Amino acid sequence: MTFFKSLLLAIFATLFLTYALGTSFLELLDINVYMDGELIEPLKAIGVSAVAIVMLVLIALAIVLSVFGSFIFISLLVLGSVAMVAIDVFWPVLLIAIVIWLMTRNSETTKKEAQYSNDNI
């Protein structure tokens, strides 16, 4: 599954579990939610708690992504530094290989250009 599909399924599962278990927990524990001195009916109380849970899930997701993002960034930095060291050690060999490649490439291109110019005459 894709990341966003999994995220949406997690959010919907959280909302469903909060709604399904919310009323029973509110009644079992005799919890009353007040806002501005007014008692909020159970369905609205569940909605408020569901929104709070979803916000906590999103915050946890951001933390997890930042940790894994840092891990990936550090891994890429290490791989890049190893590549730079390899290039630094073997630059004379790479330089000679590039010069040989350029010399052989130019001779083939010159032959093709000469053949193309002879065909147009």
Image (cartoon, rainbow, N blue to C red):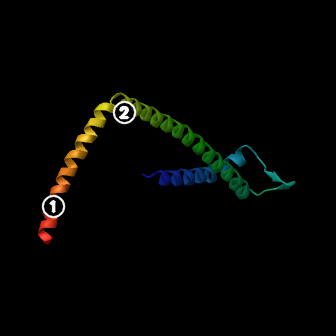
Q: What residue is shown at x 53% (from left), y 55% (from top)? A: 8
Q: Quadrant of the C terminus?
A: bottom left
Circle 2 SS class: helix
Mark 1 touching mark 2, by CB under 8 A? Answer: no
Dot 1, how many residues are within 10 Å of its Cα: few (below 14), some (14-19), or many (20+)?
few
Give the labeled residue for mark 1.
Answer: 114
Taking depth in this image into account, of 9 and 76 the one nearest to the observer is: 76
Q: Outermost residue toward the top?
A: 89
Taking depth in this image into account, of 85 and 78 the one nearest to the observer is: 85
Q: Is 97 above or below relative to 24?
A: above
Circle 1 SS class: helix
Would residue 86 be found to the left or right of residue 61 on screen? left
Q: Outermost residue toward the bottom?
A: 121
| Image quadrant in which you'd find residue 63 | top right
Task: Please state the horizontal and vertical placement of residue 4, each as a whole percent of the image.
Answer: 50, 54
Three-letter amino acid code of the residue under disc 2: Ile
Three-letter amino acid code of the residue under disc 1: Ala
Taking depth in this image into account, of 58 and 43 the one nearest to the observer is: 58
Task: Please state the horizontal and vertical placement of residue 16, each as a whole percent of the image.
Answer: 58, 54
Dot 2, how many residues are within 10 Å of its Cα: few (below 14), some (14-19), or many (20+)?
few
| Image quadrant in which you'd find residue 56 | top right
Q: Earlier in the sequence, mark 1 or mark 2?
A: 2
Would residue 81 be found to the left or right of residue 20 on screen? left
Alpha carbon distance from label 1 to label 2: 37 Å
Task: Indicate which disc residue 87 carries.
Answer: 2
